[in-house]
Amino acid sequence: MTEQYQMQVIGYIESPYKQKFAIPRQPGLIAAAHGKLVLRAPFADETFVRGIEAFSHLWLLFVFHETADKGWSPLVRPPRLGGNVRKGVFATRATFRPNPIGMSVVKLEGVSQKKGQIELLISGLDLLHGTPILDIKPYLPYSDALPHASGGFADAAPETTMTVSFSEDAAGFCQRQRAYPDLQNLIEQVLKQDPRPSYKKQRQSEQHYGMTLYNFNIKWTVNGEHNHVTEILQLPE
Ligand code: SAM
């Protein structure tokens, strides 16, 4: 019996998320996250995606490339449970797994074909920039949507009571970014999800944080349940 299989990368993700910090835990939580799946040769050909526009959503199977060489353990501590309770790795969607394969449903916004390049324009992704994609499958609502299924310890989307405001400078910066018309929305949606690690959420005093989205360094403070975006800086390409 064959116990090892070789896979080939069919494309790579271009994502606003340039670092793991601030990526949502699952797809669909941040609608303003827009990205691309850029197919690579020999898959960068119209024939491979013919008919795909008929589907509103796609399953992407990918490699957790950033953490693939960091090992795994049969028990993991899901952040959803505060990081204190252990569950079997196969009872979780943890990134550290025997085969570092992830799966995400994303919205298909369009297909772009130019200069011999095929790009699938997607949104709602939870993928790091540069994520290697192993396969694409259309989402089939009649079979994949199971509204009465039990979601175990993650039965519903995380509740969020966080609010977000922007300094005048930060709001003005966002409005000037013609190439990223949804930037302010994206920042707001990301901060509403409260990307801080659980142990920091208990802190009472005002805390300062920073994250990178696209080529922007975003600085904000957290006071109780409120995020205030103080400054946004453009990083070198
Ligand atoms: N939806 C996928 C799944 O269920 O297989 C991913 C779930 S996993 C809990 C989501 C986390 O994976 C994100 O918060 C991010 O930190 C991490 N992640 C995304 N892309 C990654 C990559 N290429 N390598 C390592 N970690 C990644």
Image (tube, rainbow, N blue to C red):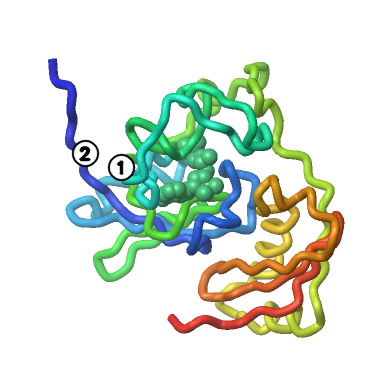
Determine whether, in the image, residue 10 is placed left or right of residue 167: left
Q: How crowded is mark 2: few (under 14 residues within 10 Å), some or many (20 or more)?
A: few
Badge 1 amino acid: Leu
Which residue has dot 1 on it? Answer: 134
Q: Residue at x 79, y 73 (%)?
A: 166
Vertical arrangement, residue 125 with respect to residue 174, above or below: above
Q: Is mark 1 on a helix, strand or loop?
A: strand
The image position of residue 152, as x and y in percent, is: 64, 20
Q: In the rendered image, is residue 206 in sight?
A: yes
Q: Where is residue 98 in the image (x, y as percent from the top left)?
A: 34, 30
| Front one among 144 and 88 | 88
173 sits left or right of 101 in the view: right
* Picture quarter with the N terminus: top left
- The answer to whether residue 56 is seen in the rendering is no
x, y (%) of residue 89?
A: 47, 26
> Which residue is denoted by mark 2 in the rendering?
7
**Labelled pair 1, 2 in contact (Cβ < 8 Å):** yes
